[in-house]
Amino acid sequence: MTKELETKLNLYLANQMIDYVKKHNLHWNLKGNAFFTLHAKLEELYDETSDILDEVAERILALGGNPVSNMKKALSIATIKELEDGPKSTEQTIRALVSDTDYWIKDSKEIVDLAEKEGDAVTADMFNGYTKEYQKLAWMLKAYNS
């Protein structure tokens, strides 16, 4: 694994760490008429994020790298932003999820391209899978909000 791929994977990992907390923030602070639907969906999403965290960290280790594994480091390199505490409306929640999901699609595709360039089909395949799931989620969120 090149340093470039390790850096990109660690950035993805750090952003997923922030996203995990962000999804909990939305889950705990959600208010509005779609509460029951979105509350359950947010729990599903942060559970999926937990799985991604583990998979990406273990992939970095399998490739001989060192995964980001503390919040101080994650916060110092993350490019996605946390949310303030406090109530979140259905509309705010959907907007945040759509924006972040669009980001994950772009970022996952960049890792696929980088991994393919390095001849790392396993990592490329892993992130193609993430891209597929994020594209499906983006479609569903946008349909929910229309």
Image (spheres, rainbow, N blue to C red):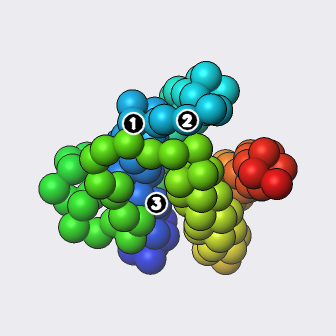
Instruction: Please state which of the two labelled residues, at mark 3 or mark 2, is closer to the viewer.
Output: 2
Q: Secondary structure at mark 1?
A: helix
**Foreground mark, 3 or 1?**
1
Between disc 3 and disc 1, whose residue precedes? 3
Distance between mark 1 and mark 2 Cα atoms: 10 Å
Residue at 59%, 58% (x, y): give it.
95
Residue tagged 3: 12
Residue occupying the point 21% across, 50% down? 71
Which residue does the numbered mark 1 point to in the structure image? 29
- Pointer 3 and pointer 1: residues touching (CB < 8 Å)? no
Q: Secondary structure at mark 3?
A: helix
Please tell me in which quadrant of the rendered image residue 120 appears: bottom right
- Residue type at mark 1: give it: Asn
Q: CA distance from mark 3 to mark 1?
A: 25 Å
Q: Quadrant of residue 88?
A: top left
Residue 35 versus residue 49: which sits nearer the camera?
Answer: 35
| Residue under pointer 2 | 32
Give me the C-alpha separation between circle 3 and circle 2.
Answer: 31 Å
